[in-house]
Amino acid sequence: DAGVTQSPTHLIKTRGQQVTLRCSPKSGHDTVSWYQQALGQGPQFIFQYYEEEERQRGNFPDRFSGHQFPNYSSELNVNALLLGDSALYLCASSPGDTDTQYFGPGTRLTVL
Amino acid sequence: GEDVEQSLFLSVREGDSSVINCTYTDSSSTYLYWYKQEPGAGLQLLTYIFSNMDMKQDQRLTVLLNKKDKHLSLRIADTQTGDSAIYFCAEGGSTLGRLYFGRGTQLTVWP
């Protein structure tokens, strides 16, 4: 049973560019959440997708957007990248009726 | 917003027990979680406890919850060098879908 998968593993971008990160949930899970983990910090909630809709959003600017596809996979898009967007981006999946979330290995984004 | 606090570092000798502590502020939390993060990796769900429970045991792991004091602890029995990692406490359920994490406790196990 495959767990949560994310791609790419690492990414290097320059300021002002745009990036798309991808996530496939654990089998049987229909809800995907995205978190940002800065160095030395705990993960911070960005948003959650359920039934292809953004169900909840954390305190992140509109430069952060997402999408969920009919097969429950998800994308995180970040526009106009800033140096401060450098972080580990974690995707987590869960069944829709529970908060118990299972995390992927993350995508390490470096903005130069 | 919700706050989750953890001490940042803990060092123990191999074979000893480790106790990692966490405090949280939201009394309406439904579930409390412990995650483990090894270097360069994502978060691994270790265990969780429902808010109406006091204790949960799962092999070497024991979770204690004091809801009155909003205090959660994770005890690892017979700690091994492979247990060296960052351990995150997280609360969920008060706002469906999102988890609130502490900054993590770096556990170092000395041989």
Image (cartoon, helix red, strand yellow):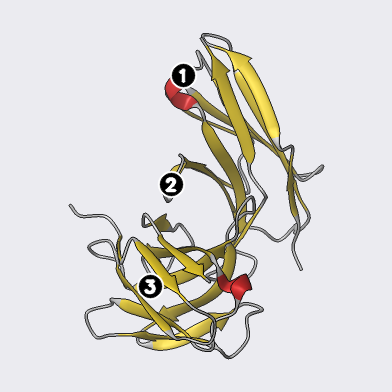
Q: Which of B111 and A44 is in front in this view?
A: B111
Q: Which of the numbered marks, if any, corresponds to residue B81?
A: 1
Looking at the image, is mark 2 or mark 1 nearer the viewer?
Answer: 2
Residue B66 shows in this picture: no
Q: What type is the residue that disc 3 sits on?
A: Thr
Looking at the image, is mark 2 or mark 3 nearer the viewer?
Answer: 2
The crowding category of the residue bearing disc 1, from other C-alpha atoms within 10 Å (few below 14, some 14 to 19, many at least 20), is some
Q: Marks 1/3: CA distance? A: 35 Å
Q: Marks 2/1: CA distance? A: 17 Å
Q: Which of the numbered marks, if any, corresponds to residue B40?
A: 2
Say which residue appears at 58% left-offset and 24% top-offset.
B108
Residue A110 vertical position relative to residue B108 in the rendered view, above or below: below
- Residue A50 is situated, as x and y percent measured from the top left of the image, at 40, 80
The crowding category of the residue bearing disc 2, from other C-alpha atoms within 10 Å (few below 14, some 14 to 19, many at least 20), is few
Q: Mark 3 lies on which chain?
A: A
Residue A107 lies in what quarter of the image? bottom left
Which residue matches tag 3?
A: A31
Mark 2 lies on a secondary structure that is loop
Residue A98 lies in what quarter of the image? bottom left
Q: Mark 1 lies on which chain?
A: B
Marks 2 and 1: CB-CB under 8 Å?
A: no
Say which residue appears at 51% left-offset and 17% top-offset.
B79
Mark 3 lies on a secondary structure that is strand
- Residue A82 is situated, as x and y percent measured from the top left of the image, at 59, 79
Q: Marks 2/3: CA distance? A: 24 Å
